Image: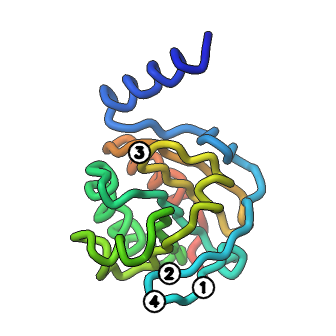
Amino acid sequence: MNVWLKSAILGLAVLLLGGIIYENVRGAAAGSAPREFTAADLRGKNWSLAEHRGRPVLVSFFETTCGPCMMEQPYLIELTKKYADRGLGLVFISREPAEEIRQAPGWRALPVPVLANAEAVVKAYEVTSYPVTLLFGPDGAVLTGGEGFGENVIDGFEKEIKKLPAVR
């Protein structure tokens, strides 16, 4: 089956199902080691995946013009609150310039880091559509990932998060 046809089928499935949760999201198969990265947040402070080793982290790739990204955002933030006892972290990543993100409604005042100008990270994880969210375990390995937004995606993350031990 050619690449175009596979992409069309996947796109249709995302539209019909409201998102897909699966073990192999683009460049990050479940159980794979992370592609380490450091990028600046909207305040210019560097954020590094390696610095968060020892706790689970949701990494959500977005674009400011992506409707499903905006819809997913509050659900992911709510998961971090609900599973604070497990040390769950969250970071949003975009290839867009910081100034563009700051001007976009709903992205400038989030209670979690928002990384900008992160084209290298987006490419490293082979993200070509949005949103794509990955759940990294405390050991840094990818636990699962989701593409698109839907209740099944959020439920898939929550199922994996519930398996994690509470932070002491």
The quarter of the image holding the C terminus is bottom right
Neighbours of disc 1 within 10 Å: few (<14), some (14-19), many (20+): few
Mark 2 neighbour density, 10 Å: few (under 14) some (14–19) many (20 or more): many
Instruction: Return the mark for residue 41.
Output: 2
Q: CA distance from mark 4 to mark 1?
A: 9 Å
Q: CA distance from mark 3 to mark 2?
A: 25 Å
User: Which element type, helix, strand or loop, lies under badge 2?
Assistant: loop
Q: Amino acid at mark 3?
A: Val
Q: Determine the residue positioned at 57% across, 58% down.
A: 135
Mark 3, secondary structure of its residue? helix
Q: Position of residue 110 (x, y in %)?
A: 33, 78
Q: From the image, tell me which residue sits under label 3.
A: 153
Amino acid type at circle 4 is: Arg
Q: Marks 4 and 3, Cα distance to the nearest angstrom?
A: 30 Å
Identified at 50% across, 74% down, the residue is 115
**Which quadrant holds the N terminus?**
top right
- Relative to 76, residue 52 above or below: below
Crowd around label 4: few <14 · some 14–19 · many ≥20 (10 Å) = few
Q: Which residue is mark 4?
A: 43
State which tag comes first along the sequence, 3 or 1: 1
